[in-house]
Amino acid sequence: MFRRRQRGDVAPDEATEDLGPDEVAESDQAPGPQGSTGRDAVIESEGPPPDEALATGSDDGSGAGGAAPAPPEAGADEDETPSMPGRLGRARRALAAPFAAIRSRGRVDDAVLDELEEALILADVGLPTTTKLMAELRSEARGKAPDELIEALRTAIVSFFAGDETELVIGEEAPSVWLFVGVNGVGKTTSIGKLARRESDRGRKIVIAAGDTFRAAAGEQLAAWAARTGTDLVEGADGADPSSVVYDAIRHAAAKNADLVLADTAGRLHTKTNLMVELEKIRRVADRDPGHVTEVLLVIDATTGQNGLVQARQFAEAVGVTGIVLTKLDGTAKGGIVLAIRADLGLPIKLVGLGEGEHDLVIFDPAEFAEALIG
Ligand SMILES: Nc1nc2c(ncn2[C@@H]2O[C@H](COP(=O)(O)OP(=O)(O)OP(=O)(O)O)[C@@H](O)[C@H]2O)c(=O)[nH]1
Ligand SMILES: [Mg+2]
């Protein structure tokens, strides 16, 4: 039976060799409040005794974040994978009226092209991408029927994403680790819950790592998802060193022959700089034997529009992000933000969140997205 190691024991050779001075210092710190949560156990595994609770005594997130949103109960349509056209309500409406107006015109002239350009900007596509798309369309569609212009836009949108790898990578050597990063509230924990469902439905054995030790309620939120999806969860005490929690989960996964570790991380610490340093460290430690980081997924809330991009850029630069999970596309987001994010970050959009239910996370499909946007 797997037994979680205490911080000082977390594979000292593998996990702490070559660590920088601050990392070593951190592992030497006196533990914080011992056994502070009583939920320091690995579900279905022996937890450490309370005095082995892993805590740095810093970054105690108790009080931060408030109550955890519980996973919504299974509803009548829970078994169904949602379609993008069905869920992109607001995103769709952003372009429906201007497209109807364009379709009612006789021929495509400069006025019609200007109308389309304005509609794309208003739909959050962003100026650089709108300009790029319009450059192709202006030469191609002038003088043609408006329907042909809209069809040309559909083709341009699909080819905009051409060559993007949307498949999530599982390495040949188990366990693979998918790390989830992003600012607080964007949907990291919920996306992990949904992916635990999706990947276990595909026959993969999953372990969830509760690497957000900052927010007091994060562990309970994950525990609910883990119970619901029949997945093992490894967590430390509040304020525990997130790298060691993630590493524990990886060791647990290896011991149980699991395929994949889904690792949650905090959306904020006391300062942004510390969070980036922390995430870099988690990534480095997670990549040590027996772990293999095959995805670092930056979760972005689509409803934050262009503002979310500024923060997203910081993460992308700090932790070697491999792809985007774009959540809340079912909400008030305008659909053009998908193009803006892809263009701005230069990273593939791998998954989109279309609701709060366990099946509401789908692989991004450019043709379906264009259909959702254009109709
Ligand atoms: N409508 C909708 N809501 C979502 C989606 N994804 C997440 N949410 C909701 O967004 C809220 C925040 O989600 P979390 O998963 O807790 O976000 P987080 O990134 O883990 O936040 P922190 O732990 O505070 O960093 C919850 O109420 C989720 O149910 C989505 O695709 N659509
Ligand atoms: Mg969370």
Image (cartoon, helix red, strand yellow):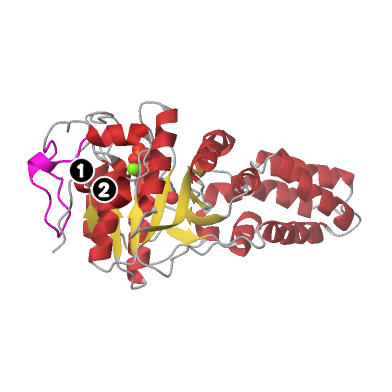
Closer to the camera, 311 or 244?
A: 244
Q: Is residue 357 left or right of residue 140?
A: left
Check contact, mark 1 vs mark 2: CB within 8 A.
Answer: yes
Which residue is farthest top? 271
Residue tagged 2: 12
Q: Residue at left 74%, top 56%?
A: 153
Q: Is residue 279 left or right of residue 342?
A: left
Q: Position of residue 258 (x, y in %)?
A: 29, 66
Q: Is residue 210 left or right of residue 360?
A: left
Q: Is residue 97 left or right of residue 278?
A: right
Residue tagged 1: 8
Q: Position of residue 284 (x, y in %)?
A: 40, 47
Look at the image and give the residue range highlighted in magenta: 35-55
Find the distance from the CA under tag 1 to the CA under tag 2.
7 Å
Give the structural element (helix, strand or loop) at label 1.
helix
Q: Position of residue 148 (x, y in %)?
A: 80, 61
